[in-house]
Amino acid sequence: MKQLIVIRHGETDWNRELRFQGQVDVPINATGRVQAARLAEALTDEHVDALVCSDLLRTRQTAEPVAARLKLDLQPDPGWREQSFGELEGLRVADVERDRPEIWAQWSRHEEDHAVPGGESARHFHGRVMIALQRLAQTPHRRVLVVTHGGVLDMLWRTARDLPLAGPRRCSIPNCGINRFHLEGERLSIMHWADDGHLCGLPEQPSTVPHGIRLASA
């Protein structure tokens, strides 16, 4: 059995602006840097065998203080990237809702096989995440820390709870929150979710699920 500690990256300006980030290489902001430092401090006493992260800048910047604290090398893996949102990437939610009502209406149906032009459907995205998870499962490491994205964590939540891919996100996924899983074979189970006590006193994070929409732009 493997133990996984899975982290959403620190805050970015685009999180604050409620923009679709997807696979655009956006850096973390000043608050995100403080969150990453707090995360590293919170994980100081953890025994971790490997530190895997998405290859996007915001996850690498979040993982770097943890890697330094735990004396681990970063292992970037594009399989842990956020869902691609194609032509919506970089756009604010409010602007899409106002200026592209047909795309917004289709997106709002949360259909698992729908993809915006140039982007990934939830089904394709989930499949990619499951491949990355099984690749990790085949390593000899017993305890692995993964720094990734909100959409990936949503896919892991749905998988562990045997929930459909269709429909809006139902769980809270704070930036730099700590989520713990057990992975045994292909069986994924949640042990603890969205621990963000180490972030007390920081500015309140904006919702990443406006209007109940599964943004996964985190």
Image: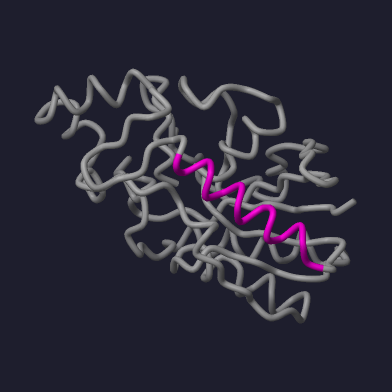
Taking the spot 24% from the left edge, 47% from the top edge, the residue there is 118
Residue drawn 43% across the image and 30% down it? 214
Q: Residue at x 61, y 59 (%)?
A: 147
The overriding secondary structure of the stretch rendered in magenta is helix
Query: At x 51% / y 40%, what residue is drawn?
Result: 204
Is residue 43 rendered to the left or right of residue 116?
right
The stretch in magenta equals 124-139
Q: How many marks?
A: 0
**175 vs 99, nearest the viewer:** 99
Name the foreground residue: 60 vs 188.
Answer: 188
Residue at far left of view: 99
Above or below, 92 against 139 in this view is above
Q: On the picture, is 108 further left or further right than 62?
A: left
Dividing the picture into quadrants, the one containing residue 173 is top right
Judge whether residue 135 is colored magenta: yes
Q: Position of residue 180 (x, y in %)?
A: 77, 45
Residue 161: in magenta span? no
Q: Position of residue 143 (x, y in %)?
A: 84, 61
